[in-house]
Image (tube, rainbow, N blue to C red):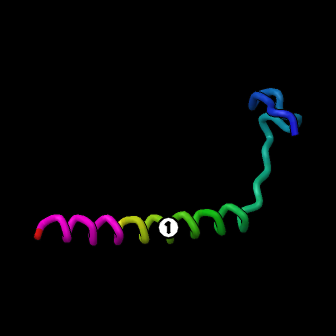
Amino acid sequence: MQNLWIWQHPNYPNFSFDKSVINTITNKLEQNHEILKQDQQKRSFKGAN
């Protein structure tokens, strides 16, 4: 796949997106964010002792 500048895209500026794919990725990012926050809190708590 060739990298294009946004204005070189064949459908520019009329892009389309699959909302279900974006939602899946967003949900996974939110889950990973929560895991990282919990891990950070555990490490901060251990350092306070």
Amino acid identity at mark 1: Asn
| Magenta span contains residue 41 | yes
- Tell me if residue 24 comes above or below residue 1 in the rendering: below
Residue extending furthest toward the left: 49
Horizontally, is 41 left or right of 10 in the view? left
Is 42 situated left or right of 18 in this image? left
Please tell me how many numbered marks the rendered image carries.
1
Instruction: Give SS at disc 1.
Output: helix
Q: Residue at 17%, 64% (x, y): give it.
A: 47
- Which region is colored magenta? 38-48
Residue located 76% across and 54% down the image: 17
Image-based side of 6 in relation to 37, left or right: right
User: Which x, y percent locates residue 31?
Assistant: 50, 71
Residue at left offset 64%, top offset 64% = 25
Q: Position of residue 37 (x, y in %)?
A: 36, 66
Spot occupied by residue 10 in the image (x, y as percentages of width and height): 88, 35
Which picture quadrant has residue 39?
bottom left
Give me the residue at 41% from left, 65% from top.
Answer: 36
